[in-house]
Amino acid sequence: MKVLLVNGSPHEHGCTRAALDEVAKELAVQGVESEIFWLGMDPLAGCIGCGSCRQTGKCFRDDCVNAFVEKAAQADGFVFGTPVHWASASGAITSFMDRVFFSAGGRLRGKPAACVASARRAGTTATLDQRMKYCYIRGLPIVPSQYWAMVHGAKAEDVAQDLEGLQIMRSLAKYMAWMLKCFAAGKAAGLEVPTLEPTVRTNFVR
C-alpha cells in the first residue's frame, strides 16, 4: 500500500512539509509506504477546459500534473497539503488540482484522500473546504482525523511546537491506514468500487 503526499507549498521544507512528514512517519508505523510529491517552484498554469485530455488521457501541458497522474495510478491513497494564502489554498495547488481532477479524476475514484492545511494563524477551514470539494465530486472517500487537519506556524520549526496539530496529522495517518486496509479486505472479498450511472447534466438556463 502506498500513499502520495502532495506538497503544494512553494517552500519545499516549510510548514506544509512538516505536516506531511508527520503523516508519513505515522503511515510507516502503520505499515503503509508513502512518497512526498512536491509541486516545485516553476509556474503552474491552470486548466483552460480545452478537453484535449479526453482524447489523449493526459493534459497537453507536460509538467508535474502528468507526472503525478502517472504516479497516482500505482498509489492507493492521497493527502493534498497546502499553505494558506489569502484564506485559501496556494495558487499552485489550485491549478494543479483543477487539472488533475479534470484530466484524470475518474482514475482516482474510490481511493481514499485527505487534505491538510498549514497557516500562521487563520484561513485553514476555508482552505480545507475548498480542497475537499475535489475529492467529494470525483468520488474519493474522505479520510477523517480527530479535528480539522491543520497545523500552525510561520516556519517549519514552529509546527514542531503545535502538539495538537501534529497529533491530528498522526490520527489522519491512522485513519488512512485503516481505510486502506479495509478497502483491501473488501476488494479481496469481491467488493469493487460502485459502477455509476451515466452522468446526467441539467442546465438551469436553456
Image (cartoon, rainbow, N blue to C red):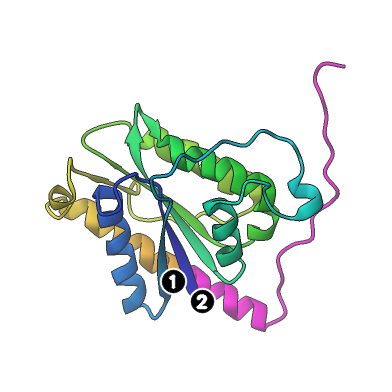
Decide if residue 189 is on the left or right side of residue 115. Answer: right
The x, y position of residue 62, in whole percent, is 60, 51
Decide if residue 86 is on the left or right side of residue 162. Answer: right
Nearer to the camera, 91 or 3: 91
The x, y position of residue 135, in whole percent, is 57, 48
The x, y position of residue 60, in whole percent, is 68, 47
| Residue at image point 23% right, 57% down | 166
The part of the chain drawn in magenta is 178-206
Q: Say above or below: 133 vs 184.
A: above
| Residue at image point 37% right, 60% down | 172
Q: Say above or below: 29 vs 81.
A: below
| Residue at image point 84% right, 51% down | 197
Q: Which mark is residue 177?
A: 1
Report helix, strand or loop for mark 2: helix
Residue ranking furthest to the bottom: 188
Is there CB contact under 8 Å for labels 1 and 2? yes
Mark 1 burial class by Cα count in 10 Å: few <14, some 14-19, many 20+? many
Is residue 136 in sight in this rendering? no
Look at mark 2 in the image and give the residue it sits on. Answer: 181
